[in-house]
Amino acid sequence: MKDGEGLAILKYEEQKADTGFSPDGLKVPIDRRVDETLSLYTEYGLRDRLTLQTKVALTRGPRQFHRL
């Protein structure tokens, strides 16, 4: 990134699932889950050969994992 130039990318992702895998590798129904993520990625050129990069993300969704 050139000196004084910047870039920002804002991204929203949604993941849904109602099928999982058993320890044997077979598809099995699971409780429906939805995960959402909002992230911001930035770059800013501090000097011609030095770029500052950052990424921050917020995630919302269930955090429980169940044994089959």
Image: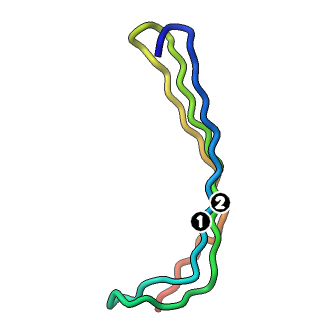
Give the tally of numbered discs: 2
- Residue highlighted by disc 1: 15
Residue at point 48%, 83% (across, down): 20
Name the kind of residue labelled 2 in the image. Glu
Residue at (63, 81) in percent of width and height:
32
Labels 2 and 1: the sequence-earlier one: 1
Q: Label 1's element?
A: strand
Q: Position of residue 67 (x, y in %)?
A: 47, 88
How packed mark 2 is, by other alpha carbons closer than 10 Å (few <14, some 14-19, many 20 or more), is some
Q: What separation in Å lies between label 2 and label 1 (alpha carbons)?
A: 6 Å
Taking the spot 58% from the left edge, 19% from the top edge, the residue there is: 6
Residue corresponding to mark 2: 36
- In the rendered structure, which amino acid carries the disc numbered 1? Gln
Task: Name the residue: 53% across, 31% down.
Answer: 54
Question: Which label was assigned to residue 46?
Answer: none
**Can you say whether 5 is above or below 68 in the image?**
above
Q: Give the answer, above or below, for where 43 lies relative to 37.
A: above
